[in-house]
């Protein structure tokens, strides 16, 4: 059992095969400082996830053959190193979140078996030499999840036509004076407002997200093994429609979607 390992494996609580600190190295037999925590997975190539919102700042295969990924966590001011991966599921520069699979646990490089070597250091040391990164014991880190603020994620854009079943004339949602079923174009989006859409169809009003009845937006997080056509079939649409709306996320190749990508359609 570990304290923080499940932040990485999510549905699996790994055990520690080698803690952070001085140890006899399993391959060299020398007393060395172990600059990370080794987590065991019962020899399984389990998925490793990002801890929270972050960014990939490096990935590849090093001179020993070990596959690795660096994930920068801006809120924490720390960077995590996933090492000995069997395979890598992300690209350098990619934005990640707690649903993003970084890669799968393996034994690439100098490893005696399948495990994750997890390194943890202050991001400000990222350009320093390996031994000067100020490696920290991830198991001693006191992780606090970000406070969940209800982000007012905008579902619609200017020009969208929506049908709504209530209308407000004020940005204050308690000041609802014209209940009506109406349809119209969104003409303005007020930044930061609780009801950010201004509709102009003769019934000018502020729209609550809750009020919109004619359109829904599906948010889908890509899982391992997904294809666009498979997702489309499940939601009664076509892969072309999903691709059209998510080109900025997917990129130029609709056949290549990556676990953790967030699609909206
Ligand atoms: Zn290790």
Image: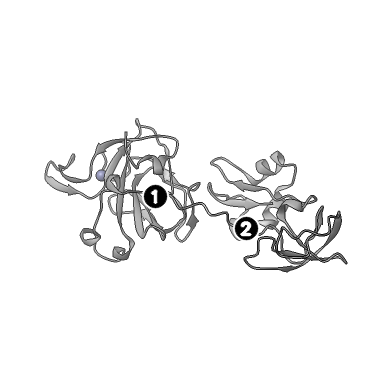
**Label 2 crowd (10 A; few <14 / some 14-19 / many >=20):** few
Q: Which mark is residue 119?
A: none
Q: Position of residue 116 (x, y in %)?
A: 33, 42
- Which image quadrant is residue 30 in? top left
- Which image quadrant is residue 103 in? top left
- Name the residue at the top extreme: 42
- Tell me what residue is drawn at x 58 percent, y 46 percent: 221
Which secondary structure lies at badge 1? Answer: loop
**Where 188 sits versus 112, above or below?**
below
* Residue tagged 2: 153
- Tell me what residue is drawn at x 62 percent, y 58 percent: 152
Looking at marks 2 and 1 on the same chain, the residue that comes earlier in the sequence is marked by 1
Q: Position of residue 230 (x, y in %)?
A: 66, 41
**Where 262 sits versus 170, above or below?**
above
- Which image quadrant is residue 45 in? top left
* Residue tagged 1: 144
Side of 6 where 160 appears, left or right: right
């Amino acid at each position: 059992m570990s304290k923080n390992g499940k932040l990485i494996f999510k549905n699996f609580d790994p055990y520690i095969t080698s803690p952070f600190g001085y140890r006899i190295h399993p391959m060299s037999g020398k007393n060395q400082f172990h600059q990370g925590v080794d987590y065991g997975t019962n020899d399984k190539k389990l998925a490793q996830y990002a801890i929270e919102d972050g960014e990939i700042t490096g990935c590849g295969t090093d001179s020993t053959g070990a596959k690795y990924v660096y994930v920068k966590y801006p809120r924490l001011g720390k960077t995590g190193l996933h090492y000995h991966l069997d395979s890598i599921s992300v690209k350098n520069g990619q934005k990640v979140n707690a649903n993003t699979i970084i890669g799968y646990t393996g034994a690439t490089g100098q490893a005696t078996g399948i495990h994750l070597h997890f390194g943890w250091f202050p991001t400000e040391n990222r350009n320093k030499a390996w031994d000067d990164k100020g490696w920290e014991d991830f198991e001693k880190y006191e992780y606090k999840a970000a406070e969940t603020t209800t982000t007012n994620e905008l579902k619609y854009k200017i020009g969208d036509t929506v049908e709504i079943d209530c209308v407000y004339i004020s940005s204050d949602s308690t000041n609802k004076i014209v209940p009506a079923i109406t349809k119209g174009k969104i003409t303005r989006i007020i930044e930061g407002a609780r009801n950010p859409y201004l509709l102009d169809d003769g019934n000018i009003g502020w729209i609550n997200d809750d009020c919109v009845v004619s359109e829904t937006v599906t948010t889908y997080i890509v899982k391992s093994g997904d294809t666009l056509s498979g997702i489309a079939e499940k939601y009664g649409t076509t892969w072309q429609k999903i691709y059209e709306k998510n080109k900025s996320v997917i990129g130029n190749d609709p056949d290549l979607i990556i676990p953790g990508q967030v699609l909206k359609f």
